[in-house]
Amino acid sequence: MAVDDQVSAGEAIISADSHTDGINGHTNGANGHTDGVNGHTDGVNGHTNGHTNGGLHPEKPKTGITVIIVGAGFGGLCAAIECHRQGHSVRLFESFSELKILGDIISFGANAGRIFRRWHTSSGDRISDRLRPLSIDLSSYGFNIHKFDTGEIVLNSKNPPADPEAPVFNGHRGEFHSILFHYVKDELRVPVRLGCRIQKYFETESEAGIELEAGERVTADVVIGADGVRSKARELVLGYVDKPKSSGYAVYRAWFDNSGMMADPETRQFCENGDTFNGWIGPEVHFLFSTIKGGTDCCWVLTHKDDAGIEESWSFPGKLEDVYKVFEGWDPMCKRIVSKTPEDKLVDWKIVYRDPLFSWVSNGGRTMLLGDSAHPFLPTSAQGATQAMEDGVTIAISLREAGKGNIGGATRAFQKIRYERVKGVQKTGETTRDVSDICPF
Ligand SMILES: Cc1cc2nc3c(=O)[nH]c(=O)nc-3n(C[C@H](O)[C@H](O)[C@H](O)COP(=O)(O)OP(=O)(O)OC[C@H]3O[C@@H](n4cnc5c(N)ncnc54)[C@H](O)[C@@H]3O)c2cc1C
């Protein structure tokens, strides 16, 4: 089955609508407004987006390029949205069989905010509008940094004024992910196949493809492996198995409702007046605690040294007892906050790392890696998901620019545009880690 055959019903419905794209005052390309990453304008090839589509997104002429994306994480979903916007025909394959709200806090920098802002929805708002109420709001509280042992506040750092064009979002990974997933599947109507664990990739001079577990082969002009840190697509691209390695650190992480915090007069202060953010910085460890969604949800992360292997898994249930051990000699408030965590909400998340790959694109140029499959990040950069999103925008535009006859040119241009930037951002994460050994992440 070729992707060429798959005409998205959503695209047909969207094209038939005649509302203008300017309903939110949003304009693209024709007026020179920069609407992409790395300075790309959204009016590539001189298209002026004169066509309209109900405010969902500017309609670009179809390119005839067919794209298979493996993995519906933030990287794969962003690539799907942007490929759809650029006029390519996309299909998405994902191993999970149903969407679950998983994980805890995730950060999206201003560079991701610019991307979220340009995704218009069928209800007339933007994806950024949907993320805002789920995100932390520190405009009045700021960030308190405490001495780890006495608890004294040494700094209250105020947030810089928000830039409406480049908003920042910090919130629950699963809640954000669910918004994007439903946008792709239900509003853009990109065909999404769940329960497909892709283990085999192949490519010829004229096409690339994947093999499903039942043996079904699906082909397209290009295959994007957005299948995360343990990528299988990486094997075809590199020609060998390259395993991620442990960083030597792990993070205890938890997300829970505020009932325990509110019941204790000592901890209620963090929840009763809206969102808060507090950090205790100690030797080799830091503890960050935030309250979100008007103080109703609580979230904390605590780094610790870890030498466990990562062969089978890098996310384990955590034990409160182990966390308490880290807090010996610390401000008693840290243990008090952590004690409000239901133990089944506690995760011990191994920090997985890898040396930069020499290539993200196969020799034939039709299979490529994107997001964590190409470049996992240390959490100190707070850019893993954001960089995966930049990748998605860049490949979508590169494909349109290069055209169906030059897929290899597009994927190689993608790598050329992205490689040094990603390396630079990865380096920033390492510099932040190394800046002082009191704060490894
Ligand atoms: C369940 C989960 C929870 C996370 N929680 C957090 C968190 O709380 N905080 C944080 O900072 N970061 C978290 N991350 C990591 C963060 O989301 C990523 O670093 C970042 O968003 C990069 O996205 P990605 O799309 O490249 O990779 P990922 O987010 O890892 O997405 C990869 C996708 O590919 C799918 N996949 C993998 N192998 C196959 C296969 N063989 N066939 C088909 N599909 C496949 C996976 O199911 C997944 O949906 C989490 C990741 C996951 C998967």
Image (cartoon, rainbow, N blue to C red):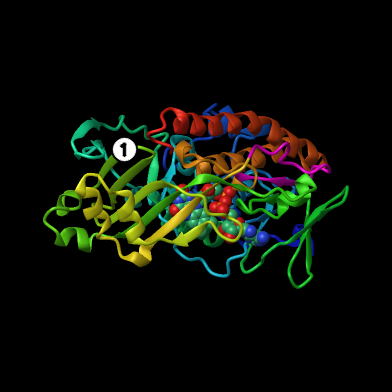
Amino acid type indicated by mark 1: Ile
Q: Which residues are magenta?
A: 355-371
Label 1 Cα crowd, 10 Å radius (few <14 / some 14-19 / many 20+): some
For the residue pair 322 and 256, the one nearer the viewer reads as: 322
56 versus 174 height, above or below:
above
Element carrying mark 1? strand
Q: Is mark 1 within 8 Å of ligand 1?
A: no
**Residue 377 visible in the displayed image:** yes
For the residue pair 85 and 166, the one nearer the viewer reads as: 166
Question: Residue 284 falls in which quadrant of the image?
Answer: top left
Residue that lies at the very extreme toward the left in this rendered image: 265
Residue at 72% of width from left, 33% of height from top?
Answer: 413
Q: From the image, which quarter does the C terminus lie in?
A: top left
Q: How many marks?
A: 1
Residue at 62% of width from left, 50% of height from top?
Answer: 84
**Residue 189 visible in the displayed image:** no
**Residue 150 placement (x, y as % from top left):** 19, 39
Residue that lies at the very extreme toward the right in this rendered image: 205
* Residue 357 drawn in magenta: yes
**Taking the image as four quarters, which one is ligand 1 found in?**
bottom right
Side of 63 relative to 304 (left or right): right
**Residue 335 placement (x, y as % from top left):** 25, 53
Name the residue tied to disc 1.
281
**Residue 145 placement (x, y as % from top left):** 26, 35
Side of 316 relative to 333 (left or right): right
**Residue 378 placement (x, y as % from top left):** 51, 40
Q: From the image, which quarter does the N terminus lie in?
A: bottom right
* Residue 141 drawn in magenta: no
Residue at 47% of width from left, 44% of height from top?
Answer: 116
Q: Mostly what secondary structure, the magenta segment?
A: loop
